[in-house]
Image: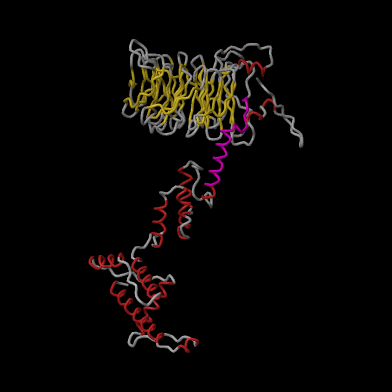
Amino acid sequence: MDDHSLDEFRRRWQEELAQAQALRKRRRPEAAERRPRRAEVAPGCGEQASGYLALAQGLLEGAGRPPPARATRAERQDAASRSRSPPAREVAGGGEQLVDQLIRDLNEMDDVPFFDIQLPYELAINIFQYLDRKELGRCAQVSKTWKVIAEDEVLWYRLCQQEGHLPESSISDYSCWKLIFQECRAKEHMLRTNWKNRKGAVSELEHIPDAVLCDVHSHDGIVIAGYTSGDVRVWDTHTWDYTAPFLESEYEEDEPGMQPYVSFVRINSSLAVAAYEDGFLNIWDLRTGKYPVHRFEHDARIQALALSQDDATVATASAFDVVMLRPSEEGYWQITAEFEVQKLVDYLEIVPDTERYPVAVATAGDLVYLLKAEDSARTLHYVYGQPVTCLDVSANQAAFGVKSLGWVYEGNKILVYSLEAERCLSKLGNALGDFTCVNLRDSPPNLMVSGNMDRRVRIHDLRTDKIALSLSAHQLGVSAVQMDDWKIVSGGEEGLVSVWDYRMSQKLWEVHSRHPVRHLSFNSHSLITANVPYERVVRNTDLDNFTTHRRHRGLIHAYEFAVDRLAFQSTLPICRAADTVPGYNYDLALAFP
């Protein structure tokens, strides 16, 4: 309906109301008790007036109207001025006010809000995909149409994938992804509460008699440990079955107890690797069996060992050589690359998420090397007299601690290098003590956590090159540290494992063991800690095995926070009853100082 039709509608309706009011004034007083007659319509205007009345009745009842004709610029300005001007009050009374209100509503209906426009469903989904869960909940309360769009399975499946819930699932696996998202959020809240209250189950992994723990590593709940007896053992904490299989070596069985110590162990989802004191390296495939699939020998002791978390790439450092091993397409292990360095290697890490050729970072004294399989060894960092004290790498960065020595003391720092540009990005910290551990790979974006011999755990902001938080954690220095989006788990040389809520700068709980913490790894629902002794000598063999093991041979603890049990009340595997009788519990709960 254009402006001319509205003016015509206004004039006809006002004339009709004026005639009806004039007829009521001419009625006799005694006719007031009679039933009022229908108001007469002006001659020649009956059909048009009834048409306008029908249109007005339909508009008042919510019926639609045809789209208006495109008006010129002058007509739009005239209509806007009329809509802004106050309506004229006629003498007719309430009827004229109702007519003016209806006409003002008709003029305002040119600006149609978004939720009355009939958009294609696919276009609406593309708009709603930029909303988070709270905004989708608010949009679902607008109208029925918006509720259908806001509860679409595609939107909630995408939210689950963005927040890391069920990453390997497809959209056809579940019928209601909104309910799945709510269940995952509730589980996440329950796990966080259990972490804060130390509510769960803890088990001590079974030890090997007459052997001292040498090295421990874990990946996604699978734990590997090497001992002075030459034994290598693996546990799967997902099944809570700690009867661990032994990974056999190729030493002769007629030489019991003559196997060399295990220097390093590493594990990922498919491989287990162990390096021995005599320079031998064993590689096991966890999917095929407990016997090694490849055996490699160095001329000297292996000083560093690294295993890729993504694929089957192994890097070893012995004397002044660094070797990268990888299976071919036929499955035969071969040397992919070999490098020669100037000093003995202290730390060695494989860069994750490399495409075709493996890349590693090695530190040797005050030298840091970037080792690419298709290139020779390249010096990433070198300052004479400033040795590297720790190392960690991510997909495109490397972070290592540097000890400052000499006449000009600048303080110990952590340097962050770009592996693509091969240049220094940040110089973090200015501590008096040596940085003993740094975790860049597992930290949230733009953050990094480090431990120092000055007893402090620090969170570094990579955007501002400043320390975001500093916590006084361990009396004898920090030996291991890891963080996620809300907590820090740190281990110290005195054997203390502490859990912190770094948003509140508050310690949640701690546990203590005799030996230094050499390994810790956690995810959303579990925690693995290992206390490895300094001395690798068995002492007091005449005492009870369990007591001797706890005092001198090292410990491995596995915490599971998805279990609704108190961690300090859980029963150790050695104290669990072999046979269960309904109604009786023969498990022994032991207490240790």
**Magenta residue check for 194:** yes
Q: Nearer the viewer, residue 151 or 248?
A: 151
* Residue 447: x %, y % from top left: 42, 31
Q: Is residue 265 above or below residue 106?
A: above
Question: Which picture quadrant has residue 87?
Answer: bottom left
* Residue 30: x %, y % from top left: 48, 89
* Quarter of the image where the C terminus is located: top right
* Quarter of the image where the N terminus is located: bottom left
* Residue 368: x %, y % from top left: 36, 20
Question: Which picture quadrant has residue 198?
Answer: top right
Q: Which residues are magenta?
A: 181-205
**Magenta residue check for 203:** yes
The prevailing secondary structure element of the residues shown in magenta is helix
Say whether residue 201 is visible: yes
* Residue 254: x %, y % from top left: 61, 14
**Numbered-mark total:** 0
Give the residue drawn at x 55%, y 40%.
189
Give the residue drawn at x 49%, y 29%.
505
Q: Nearer the viewer, residue 262 or 100?
A: 100
Q: Is residue 345 above or below residue 571?
A: above
Q: Nearer the viewer, residue 129 or 540?
A: 129
Say whether residue 449 is visible: no
View extreme (top): residue: 407
Q: Is residue 252 left or right of residue 336?
A: right
Q: Is residue 272 above or below residue 66?
A: above
How is the rendered protein coloured? Answer: secondary structure
